[in-house]
């Protein structure tokens, strides 16, 4: 912004002589971005450049960046109800729920406002450490199950989302916290008893030999061709009928 100031003609005494100085024109360059918003058409919003370090690995930190404007205020919003008033905020321990686009709104002195949105932030999920055949499960030393039917969707009785494989030798089920469809990521296995919170899952296994209890482990969720796949590897399980302890692996892909 350029500010012009006119100064009147001035008389100056030099060696007893009167000298008339011409009018002076002062030009002041203001480097700070500002505006005077007298009406909706008089506002020139600031130019914005945004960036994010995408793609990013699960668990790493995301850095959001927007160019600096003197005197401006910043407000970021994004997935999973994210909000920040920092200019260049950082999000630690990124999860799959944090994937998506982030928008910053910048307000400069005088009230002019502009906003900009990042490219979609991608959170990559590590592959499962095993590769069971699609829609199969195996209990080491006990039972192999091939699913002839797979059902997915919110539970009718609990606030959970179910992915269930049905086979002649038994059923294998992933039960995720929340009725919403799980997003790609790594979920922590919890015992069947207790309340599930976001990022947790229980694994329910029933065979012709009875029910199998699981305790801790990880379930890997991926999406390929718009189809969700959940995989568990070497999960510690025990038979509630015989007390036999072993491990189970399995993979379910939605139909």
Image (cartoon, helix red, strand yellow):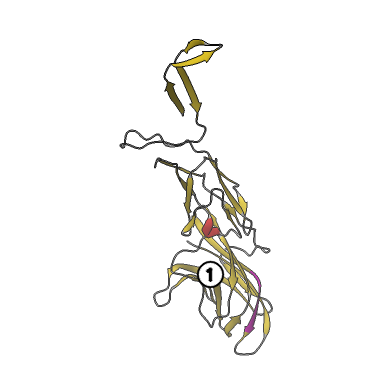
x and y, in percent, of residue 212 in the image: 59, 82
Q: Residue furthest front?
A: 16
Please give left or right for residue 106 compared with residue 63 in the image: left
179 falls in the magenta region: no
x and y, in percent, of residue 72 in the image: 48, 44
In the picture of the structure, the residue carrying the numbered disc 1 is 147
x and y, in percent, of residue 40 in the image: 31, 37
Q: Residue furthest bottom?
A: 242
Q: Nearer the viewer, residue 60 or 132?
A: 60
Q: Nearer the viewer, residue 81 or 112?
A: 112
Q: Is residue 35 above or below residue 162?
A: above
* Secondary structure beneath label 1: strand
Residues in magenta, as a range: 233-238
- The residue lying at 55 percent from left, 58 percent from top is 96
Q: Is residue 55 visible?
A: yes
x and y, in percent, of residue 254 in the image: 49, 62
Q: Is residue 64 above or below residue 251?
A: above
Q: Residue furthest left?
A: 39
- The residue lying at 48 percent from left, 23 percent from top is 27
Q: Nearer the viewer, residue 204 or 190?
A: 190
- Name the chief secondary structure element in magenta: strand
Q: Is residue 221 visible?
A: no
Q: Residues within 10 Å of mark 1 (few under 14, many from 20)?
A: many
């Amino acid at each position: 912004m350029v500010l012009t100031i006119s100064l009147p003609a001035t008389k100056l005494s030099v060696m007893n002589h009167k000298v008339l100085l011409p009018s002076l024109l002062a030009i002041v360059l203001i480097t700070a971005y500002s505006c005077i918003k007298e009406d909706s058409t008089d506002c020139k919003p600031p130019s914005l450049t945004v960036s994010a370090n995408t793609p990013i690995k699960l668990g790493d930190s995301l850095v959001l960046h927007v160019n600096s404007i003197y005197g401006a205020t910043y407000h970021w919003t994004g997935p999973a109800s994210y909000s920040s008033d920092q200019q260049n905020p950082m999000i630690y321990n990124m999860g799959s729920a944090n994937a998506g686009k982030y928008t910053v709104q910048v307000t400069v002195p005088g009230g002019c406002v502009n906003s900009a949105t990042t490219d979609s932030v991608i959170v990559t999920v590590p592959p499962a450490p095993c590769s069971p055949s699609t829609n199969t499960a195996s209990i080491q030393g006990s039972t192999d199950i091939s699913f002839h039917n797979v059902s997915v969707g919110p539970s009718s009785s609990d606030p959970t989302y179910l992915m269930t494989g049905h086979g002649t030798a038994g059923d294998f089920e992933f039960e995720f916290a929340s009725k919403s469809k799980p997003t790609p990521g790594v979920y922590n296995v919890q015992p069947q008893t207790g309340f599930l919170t976001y990022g947790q899952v229980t694994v329910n296994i029933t065979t012709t030999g009875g029910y199998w209890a699981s305790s801790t482990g990880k379930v890997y969720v991926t999406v390929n061709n718009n189809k969700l796949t959940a995989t568990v590897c070497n999960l510690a399980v025990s038979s509630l009928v015989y007390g036999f302890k072993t491990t189970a692996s399995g993979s379910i892909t939605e139909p």
